[in-house]
Image: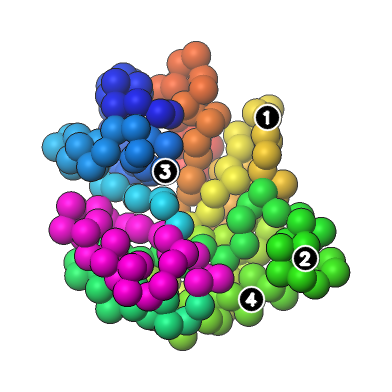
Amino acid sequence: MASADGARRLLDQLPGLRWAKIGPMLFLAAGPDVVRQCRARGIRVFLDLKWHDIPHAVAGAVRAASALGVDLATVHALGGEDMVRAAVEARGAMRVAGVSVLTSHTAESFGRAVGRPRPELAVEVERLARLLVGAGVDAIVTSPDEIGVVRAVAGPDRWIVVPGIRPAGSDAGDQRRSAEPKAAVAAGATHLVVGRPITEAREPGEVYQRICEAIG
Protein backbone atom coordinates (compact mmCIF):
# COMPACT_ATOMS: atom_id res chain seq x y z
CA MET A 1 0.00 0.00 0.00
CA ALA A 2 1.73 3.15 -1.18
CA SER A 3 -0.83 5.94 -1.58
CA ALA A 4 -3.41 7.82 0.45
CA ASP A 5 -6.11 7.03 -2.12
CA GLY A 6 -5.28 3.33 -2.00
CA ALA A 7 -5.45 3.36 1.79
CA ARG A 8 -8.81 5.14 1.70
CA ARG A 9 -10.25 2.61 -0.75
CA LEU A 10 -8.98 -0.27 1.36
CA LEU A 11 -10.46 1.13 4.57
CA ASP A 12 -13.80 1.55 2.81
CA GLN A 13 -13.81 -2.23 2.24
CA LEU A 14 -12.99 -3.14 5.84
CA PRO A 15 -15.92 -2.09 8.02
CA GLY A 16 -15.38 -2.87 11.66
CA LEU A 17 -11.60 -2.67 11.40
CA ARG A 18 -10.18 -1.71 14.80
CA TRP A 19 -6.46 -1.38 14.02
CA ALA A 20 -4.51 -0.29 10.95
CA LYS A 21 -0.79 -0.82 10.51
CA ILE A 22 0.98 2.00 8.68
CA GLY A 23 4.42 1.07 7.39
CA PRO A 24 7.17 3.15 5.80
CA MET A 25 5.88 2.97 2.22
CA LEU A 26 2.47 4.36 3.06
CA PHE A 27 3.73 6.86 5.64
CA LEU A 28 6.28 8.31 3.22
CA ALA A 29 3.75 8.46 0.39
CA ALA A 30 0.78 9.82 2.33
CA GLY A 31 2.38 11.52 5.31
CA PRO A 32 0.84 12.15 8.73
CA ASP A 33 -2.60 12.71 7.18
CA VAL A 34 -3.03 8.96 6.79
CA VAL A 35 -2.81 8.63 10.57
CA ARG A 36 -5.45 11.35 10.98
CA GLN A 37 -7.63 9.62 8.38
CA CYS A 38 -7.59 6.40 10.40
CA ARG A 39 -8.25 8.20 13.66
CA ALA A 40 -11.22 10.02 12.11
CA ARG A 41 -12.74 6.60 11.34
CA GLY A 42 -12.22 5.42 14.91
CA ILE A 43 -9.38 3.10 13.89
CA ARG A 44 -6.37 2.75 16.17
CA VAL A 45 -3.00 3.25 14.50
CA PHE A 46 0.04 0.97 14.63
CA LEU A 47 2.92 2.98 13.14
CA ASP A 48 5.50 0.39 12.15
CA LEU A 49 8.63 2.35 11.22
CA LYS A 50 11.05 0.29 13.36
CA TRP A 51 13.14 3.23 14.52
CA HIS A 52 16.83 2.41 15.00
CA ASP A 53 18.90 5.53 15.63
CA ILE A 54 20.62 7.39 18.44
CA PRO A 55 18.46 7.75 21.58
CA HIS A 56 17.85 11.49 21.12
CA ALA A 57 16.57 11.06 17.56
CA VAL A 58 14.33 8.14 18.42
CA ALA A 59 12.88 9.91 21.46
CA GLY A 60 12.00 12.88 19.25
CA ALA A 61 10.32 10.64 16.69
CA VAL A 62 8.33 8.90 19.42
CA ARG A 63 7.15 12.22 20.87
CA ALA A 64 6.04 13.35 17.40
CA ALA A 65 4.15 10.10 16.81
CA SER A 66 2.43 10.32 20.18
CA ALA A 67 1.38 13.92 19.50
CA LEU A 68 -0.03 12.81 16.14
CA GLY A 69 -2.33 10.32 17.84
CA VAL A 70 -0.51 7.09 17.08
CA ASP A 71 -1.48 4.28 19.46
CA LEU A 72 1.47 1.91 19.01
CA ALA A 73 4.87 2.46 17.38
CA THR A 74 7.91 0.24 16.87
CA VAL A 75 11.57 0.58 17.72
CA HIS A 76 14.23 -2.01 16.92
CA ALA A 77 15.84 -3.88 19.79
CA LEU A 78 19.19 -3.84 18.00
CA GLY A 79 19.29 -0.09 18.61
CA GLY A 80 20.24 -0.97 22.17
CA GLU A 81 18.78 -0.63 25.64
CA ASP A 82 19.50 3.10 25.98
CA MET A 83 17.68 3.85 22.73
CA VAL A 84 14.68 1.72 23.65
CA ARG A 85 14.47 3.26 27.12
CA ALA A 86 14.59 6.75 25.60
CA ALA A 87 11.64 5.80 23.38
CA VAL A 88 9.68 4.45 26.33
CA GLU A 89 10.31 7.58 28.39
CA ALA A 90 9.15 9.81 25.50
CA ARG A 91 6.00 7.86 24.58
CA GLY A 92 3.33 9.75 26.49
CA ALA A 93 -0.02 8.00 26.10
CA MET A 94 1.25 5.91 23.19
CA ARG A 95 2.56 2.35 23.55
CA VAL A 96 6.01 1.35 22.33
CA ALA A 97 6.68 -2.08 20.81
CA GLY A 98 10.17 -3.49 20.47
CA VAL A 99 11.04 -5.50 17.36
CA SER A 100 13.20 -8.56 18.01
CA VAL A 101 14.28 -10.45 14.84
CA LEU A 102 12.57 -9.73 11.52
CA THR A 103 10.34 -12.49 10.16
CA SER A 104 12.26 -12.36 6.87
CA HIS A 105 15.42 -13.63 8.60
CA THR A 106 16.70 -17.17 8.62
CA ALA A 107 19.40 -18.26 11.05
CA GLU A 108 21.94 -17.86 8.25
CA SER A 109 20.90 -14.36 7.22
CA PHE A 110 20.69 -13.12 10.81
CA GLY A 111 24.08 -14.66 11.54
CA ARG A 112 25.61 -12.76 8.63
CA ALA A 113 24.04 -9.53 9.88
CA VAL A 114 25.43 -9.86 13.41
CA GLY A 115 28.71 -11.57 12.53
CA ARG A 116 28.02 -14.97 14.07
CA PRO A 117 27.75 -18.24 12.13
CA ARG A 118 24.22 -19.64 12.22
CA PRO A 119 22.97 -18.45 15.64
CA GLU A 120 19.91 -20.13 17.12
CA LEU A 121 17.10 -17.66 16.44
CA ALA A 122 15.07 -18.60 19.51
CA VAL A 123 18.09 -17.80 21.70
CA GLU A 124 18.63 -14.48 19.93
CA VAL A 125 14.97 -13.55 20.26
CA GLU A 126 15.01 -14.41 23.97
CA ARG A 127 18.09 -12.24 24.50
CA LEU A 128 16.52 -9.29 22.70
CA ALA A 129 13.21 -9.79 24.49
CA ARG A 130 14.99 -9.55 27.84
CA LEU A 131 16.63 -6.31 26.71
CA LEU A 132 13.24 -4.92 25.66
CA VAL A 133 11.53 -5.91 28.89
CA GLY A 134 14.37 -4.34 30.86
CA ALA A 135 13.88 -1.11 28.93
CA GLY A 136 10.16 -1.09 29.73
CA VAL A 137 8.43 -1.66 26.38
CA ASP A 138 4.68 -2.19 26.31
CA ALA A 139 4.80 -4.84 23.57
CA ILE A 140 7.22 -7.11 21.75
CA VAL A 141 7.12 -7.92 18.04
CA THR A 142 8.19 -11.46 17.23
CA SER A 143 7.69 -14.13 14.61
CA PRO A 144 5.16 -16.94 15.17
CA ASP A 145 8.01 -19.36 15.84
CA GLU A 146 9.17 -17.55 18.98
CA ILE A 147 5.85 -16.59 20.62
CA GLY A 148 6.34 -19.02 23.50
CA VAL A 149 9.90 -17.86 24.12
CA VAL A 150 8.81 -14.23 24.22
CA ARG A 151 5.80 -14.88 26.46
CA ALA A 152 8.03 -16.59 29.01
CA VAL A 153 10.21 -13.47 29.17
CA ALA A 154 7.49 -10.85 28.77
CA GLY A 155 5.15 -12.05 31.48
CA PRO A 156 1.36 -12.38 31.22
CA ASP A 157 0.34 -8.78 30.52
CA ARG A 158 2.68 -7.42 27.86
CA TRP A 159 1.34 -7.45 24.29
CA ILE A 160 2.88 -9.86 21.80
CA VAL A 161 2.51 -8.54 18.26
CA VAL A 162 3.03 -11.16 15.57
CA PRO A 163 3.67 -10.43 11.87
CA GLY A 164 4.14 -13.11 9.25
CA ILE A 165 0.50 -14.14 9.51
CA ARG A 166 -0.69 -16.01 6.45
CA PRO A 167 -4.19 -17.53 6.09
CA ALA A 168 -4.35 -21.09 4.78
CA GLY A 169 -3.50 -21.25 1.10
CA SER A 170 -1.86 -17.82 0.86
CA ASP A 171 1.66 -17.17 -0.40
CA ALA A 172 4.28 -16.70 2.34
CA GLY A 173 6.20 -14.27 0.11
CA ASP A 174 9.40 -13.10 1.83
CA GLN A 175 8.22 -14.21 5.27
CA ARG A 176 10.54 -17.02 6.35
CA ARG A 177 8.77 -17.66 9.68
CA SER A 178 5.01 -17.52 9.32
CA ALA A 179 1.82 -19.08 10.73
CA GLU A 180 -1.91 -19.20 10.23
CA PRO A 181 -3.97 -16.78 12.37
CA LYS A 182 -5.61 -19.31 14.69
CA ALA A 183 -2.30 -21.04 15.44
CA ALA A 184 -0.62 -17.76 16.35
CA VAL A 185 -3.41 -16.79 18.74
CA ALA A 186 -3.36 -20.25 20.31
CA ALA A 187 0.39 -19.88 20.87
CA GLY A 188 -0.12 -16.63 22.78
CA ALA A 189 -0.18 -13.75 20.30
CA THR A 190 -2.30 -10.80 21.43
CA HIS A 191 -2.17 -8.87 18.13
CA LEU A 192 -1.73 -10.21 14.59
CA VAL A 193 -0.25 -8.32 11.65
CA VAL A 194 -1.79 -9.34 8.32
CA GLY A 195 -0.64 -7.32 5.34
CA ARG A 196 -0.46 -8.55 1.77
CA PRO A 197 -3.02 -11.38 2.10
CA ILE A 198 -5.56 -8.57 2.65
CA THR A 199 -4.11 -5.60 0.75
CA GLU A 200 -3.41 -7.62 -2.41
CA ALA A 201 -6.67 -9.60 -2.37
CA ARG A 202 -9.38 -9.06 -4.98
CA GLU A 203 -11.91 -8.86 -2.15
CA PRO A 204 -10.04 -7.58 0.92
CA GLY A 205 -13.20 -7.47 3.02
CA GLU A 206 -13.91 -11.16 2.47
CA VAL A 207 -10.36 -12.16 3.41
CA TYR A 208 -10.50 -9.98 6.52
CA GLN A 209 -13.81 -11.52 7.55
CA ARG A 210 -12.51 -15.07 7.05
CA ILE A 211 -9.51 -14.31 9.24
CA CYS A 212 -11.75 -12.92 11.98
CA GLU A 213 -13.96 -16.00 11.79
CA ALA A 214 -10.93 -18.32 11.91
CA ILE A 215 -9.70 -16.68 15.10
CA GLY A 216 -13.17 -16.92 16.63
Confirm whether residue 157 shows in the render: no
- Badge 2 local density, few (<14 within 10 Å), some, or many (20+)? some
Instruction: State which region is magenta.
Output: 51-79
**Amino acid beneath label 2:** Gly
Q: Quadrant of residue 24?
A: top left
For image coordinates 64% across by 70% down, the residue present is: 125
Q: Residue at x 71, y 63 (%)?
A: 113
Above/below status of 89 relative to 207: below
- State the CA–CA distance, disc 4 to disc 3: 26 Å
Mark 1 Cα shell of 10 Å, populated few (<14), some (14-19), many (≥20): few
At horizontal 22% and vertical 65% (from top left) the residue drawn is 63
What number is the disc on residue 111? 2
First of labels 1, 4 by sequence position: 4
Q: What number of labels is visible?
A: 4
The answer to which of 57 and 75 lies nearer the viewer is: 57
99 over 179 or under it: above or below: below
Name the residue beneath numbered marker 3: 24
From the viewer's side, name the closer residue of 15 and 134. 134
Task: Quote the CA–CA distance across marks 2 and 4.
Answer: 15 Å
**Kind of residue indicated by mark 1:** Asp
Circle nearer the viewer, 2 or 4: 2
At which x and y percent is residue 6?
35, 21
Residue 153 screen position, x and y as percent = 56, 79
Q: List the residue tagged with mark 1.
A: 171
Towards the viewer: 195 or 62: 62
